[in-house]
Image (cartoon, rainbow, N blue to C red):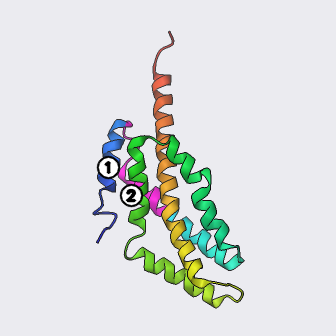
Amino acid sequence: MRSWRNSGTRRSCFGYAASSCGLCNESMFGSCVGSKVGMAAVLGVTHIIKGWPTHHFIIGSYSLPLVIVMTLFAPAEIIGIAYDSGEATTSTITTPLVTTLGVGLASSIHGRDSPPIDGFCLIVFTRLFPIVTVVIYVQIAEYLVKRLKRIGQPDK
């Protein structure tokens, strides 16, 4: 079984963090990933309750520059960590739980065409949000490190 504690994500992040002046610590990294899984679930439930079209979210999530362009501009060392954090959040416990939440909620609301697709949409969200969060977090950390180095250097 693969879990957050047993995955290589933590060790890899901290190996990368050493090269970025330690701005990526264990509690901040875990908080970023965990909070985005929660936000993904809230967005997915809101999408089901409001009756928003599912295909817009699924197609838009993978085709928008959100993931593709951010991956292109992310440091090479962090891409694997970011995608692994998305994989670690959709584990053997999270996936059935989130799918059941989506299917059960969509089944109880009249007018939802396909409850299984709504459950799948929740999985898409819980997988994508941590990826985007880790990439944004590392890009902000690198920006801050560069800025601190620039501020710390005397003018020539």
Tell me which residue sits at (46%, 18%) in the image.
153
Residue in the picture at 39% in, 37% down: 20
Q: Amino acid at mark 2?
A: Asp
Q: Position of residue 142 (x, y in %)?
A: 46, 37
Q: Which residues are magenta?
A: 20-35
> Dot 1 corresponds to which residue?
12
- Secondary structure that dominates the magenta span: helix
x, y percent for residue 60 = 63, 61
Locate residue 102, reporting x and y percent: 56, 80
Numbered disc 2: secondary structure: helix
Does residue 32 belong to the magenta stretch? yes
> Which residue is disc 2 drawn over?
84
Q: Is residue 104 visible?
A: yes
Residue 136 within the segment the image draws in magenta: no
Q: Secondary structure at mark 1?
A: helix
Residue depicted at 70% across the width and 73% down the height = 52
